[in-house]
Structures are given as C-alpha cells and as structure tokens.
Amino acid sequence: MKIEIRDQPFDPWQELSSYQQTGSTAASSYGATALFVGTMRDFNEGDRVHGMTLEHYPGMTEKHLEAICHNAIDRCNLLDALVIHRVGPIEPGEPIVLVAVWSAHRAAAFDACRLIMDDLKSRAPFWKKEELDEGKVRWVDHNT
Amino acid sequence: MKIEIRDQPFDPWQELSSYQQTGSTAASSYGATALFVGTMRDFNEGDRVHGMTLEHYPGMTEKHLEAICHNAIDRCNLLDALVIHRVGPIEPGEPIVLVAVWSAHRAAAFDACRLIMDDLKSRAPFWKKEELDEGKVRWVDHNT
Amino acid sequence: MSITIRLFASLREQLGTECCQAEPDAVSNVEEAWRAVAGDSPQGENVLVAVNMEYVKPGAAVKDGDEVAFFPPVTGG
Amino acid sequence: MSITIRLFASLREQLGTECCQAEPDAVSNVEEAWRAVAGDSPQGENVLVAVNMEYVKPGAAVKDGDEVAFFPPVTGG
C-alpha cells in the first residue's frame, strides 16, 4: 500500500508503471485492477476556472487516507491500494487524485475503488480554492 | 473512441499515455477517468493455470465492443472510451483487457466503466481455453 | 450464393469443423442451420446463435447470403 | 503544556489566524476551544471538528496537550 501527498504535478500512468514494477503485488495473482483519476477542470458551477490551490491538514490527511484504504482492503478483500493526491497550486488539466486498487476479482476492485474515492471526498481534509476571471478567488464549499 | 483487438502483449499504462497524447479528449474538460485492467491469473477454480488461448469471432467482436461503448457513452454521458482486448496465446500476469472511460463526473465514469466490463463479459464473443498441469487443456465454461 | 455456418471454441472442437456452407433451399431458420452442421447432435441449452453477427433467438429466420454462428457462452474480459 | 487550536481554509481566512495556543484551565471541550479562537463568532452549522486528527462530535472533551482543529466541509478528490 502507498499513500502519497504531492506538491508537484504527476503522471498517473508513469506512477502506476513504477508502482507495479516494485512488485508490490504479484503480477499473476491479482486479476483485476480498478482505478480512478480526478483531473482539474477549467469550469465549475458555470464559471471559468484558471487555477486552483489545494490546502490540506498535514498529518490528519495521511492518517485518514490510510484508514480509508485499510477499510477498503478489509471490506473488499483487496490485495493492494495506491493513492496519490496533489496539494498546492494546480493548473487545469493536471491530475488531482489517483486511486488504484488490485484484487483477485472484478466486482471487489470496482467496489473498493469507488468506496475509497467516496470516503476520500467526504472525509479526507483537503480544501480547494479556485481562481476565477478578473483575479477573483472562491473556496469550493461542497463536494459533489 | 478506440476499440482494438491485440494478438501481442500490451502495457496498459503505456497505451493510456499514448491515447491521451493523441488529444482525443481535451485534457482540462474531462474531470474523471475510470478504468479497469483484467490480468491473467495463474489460478482458476482451484487449478494451476500455465497459459491460456483466447479465441474470438473476428468482425462480431469489434461490432459488439463498439455497440457496448456507444451504449455506455449515451447512457452515462461519457466524453470518450477506450477498449483493448487480447486474443491468442496469453501468459499469466499479462493484461487481457483494458477499459478506460472519460467523463465530466466521477459517478458517470465509475458507472460506465463497470457497464462496459459487464456487457463485454456477457456479450462480446471471446472464449478462453486454459492450459493446466500435465498438458491438460480446458475451455472456461462460464464467466464470473 | 449460399448460407455460411460457423462454429467457435468448444463447439468447433466437439463437432470437428469450423465453417461450412449450406444450400438456402435446405436452411430457412437457425434450427435447420444447426442440423446442417451438427446432424442429430442436440444443440444444448447454452449454445448462443448469431445471424450476421447479431444475437438471435431460437427459431430466427435465415436467408440466402446469411452467416449463422453457433458458440458456447462467452468468456472474455 | 497547552492546547493547540488550528483553523483551515475559509475558516482560517475568516478568523484571520491559523493556529493559537490556549491554556488548559480555560478549555475543557471543543466549544470552549472555539470561543478561545473565535470569541463570540458563531461556529456555523457545517464546521467540522477534529481532536488529535480524529473527527469528534460537538461537546467532545479536550485535555492538556490536545490539538483541536476547526475546518469547513472537505473538498478534496
């Protein structure tokens, strides 16, 4: 399992390639990999968004992401999980979050990936501040 | 949208990287990417599996995968979809199938990826023949 | 022209053939296509049938130039 | 020792501070921690509270050495 908070852009496919090469899961035993990548959009609630800053609560973030992953591993019988989440300034088009899970079975992998994303969105202490037209800024006030 | 039948091993992360670089989806508009990779396991129904051959119905396979993707694009309001499926001889640990979808929203992406995989498993004309211990072979008789 | 009948996977191995042509005079539906390729062998409950690469129900009509395929439950993915 | 009180995101900006220390004599629960940092400003319905990085309910106890954090609904992912 790997949980990582990043303050620099990352390439999800490169990260997955590197992570799998570490041999953290035996390639011939997992069967199913499900994953989700959340990317910064240039539009939100009808407004053009030029950039974003992601604030977090260092320490609590890692602790809760670990708890969220352990919960999914136990409930869905996962073999492994990887979460990478950006913080700091982010440009439109850049990945914000990557969640990948490995399991022997397809249904468990889908369920676990969704469970981790839902828990992360509702419980992990991250906050987004958007930069709009004419230098206006706005805190995103709820997650969808 | 891209549908491809492959008779050679492929690296899903490399495929995704290449596909996104074609600019098939505008990087800053999609928001959510969900994907599934099915990998050949070295065990099935209690038996060691040394290798496998995937047979398909050329023509019908592509036609049904396209219909399955168009259905998911319409129902889940997807921006794009990519399906790569192996045929021919396959070794344990090698990817068999990659399904990736791009959407503005997370729920739609998860739903669509699962829908495509479920439809593919139940309707796309592929058949697996497993190589077991002592040179025995066995057709897989149903999908789970 | 004629009707093309194709078999896949375990069905192809059981019947020992993968493709045959049938005269349209002798084959007007999928049951007759099955008999043309399999003789008296029962079709089996789980066998799927496609005409021109679309799934069809038992009893579906077959006409000259059609391709009829019989195969076991699919196991891709 | 003392009690550490932290604020994040919009709440940090509204109250104009991100961290303060309070005396354990004056703060025995999260409501008292809020007043120590925000005075009479109402806490607001949606504010989340964590003690030592675990979510707690309103009225939760606070003891010497604890870290209490107040923040708006989370918007990660």
Image (cartoon, coloured by chain):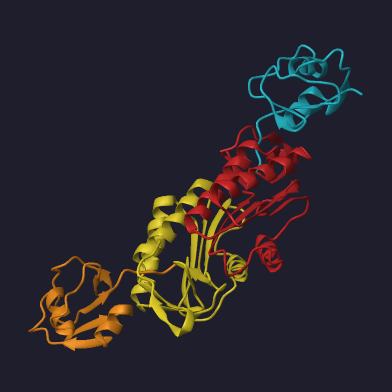
Chain colours: A yellow, B red, C cyan, D orange
- The image shows a total of numbered marks equal to 0
Q: Residue at x 62, y 71 (%)?
A: A14
Q: Position of residue A133 (x, y in %)?
A: 48, 80
Quarter assignment of residue C43: top right
Left or right of residue D5: residue A92: right
**Along the horizontal axis of the image, is B63 left or right of A92?**
right
Q: Quadrant of residue C32?
A: top right
Q: Quick check: C41 above or below A140?
A: above
Among all residues in the image, which is located at the extreme right? C1
Observer-nearest of D7 and C1: C1
Residue B111 is situated, as x and y percent measured from the top left of the image, at 51, 49
Coordinates of residue A63 in the picture (x, y in percent):
35, 71
Given residues B16 and D38, the one toward you in this image is D38
Q: Position of residue A4 (x, y in %)?
A: 47, 73
Side of A43 where D65 appears, left or right: left
* Residue A105 shows in the view: no
Q: Residue at x 27, y 81 (%)?
A: D7
Is the C terminus of chain A in the top left, top right, bottom left or bottom right quadrant? bottom left
Q: Residue at x 66, y 60 (%)?
A: B12
Q: Is residue B140 left or right of residue A53?
A: right
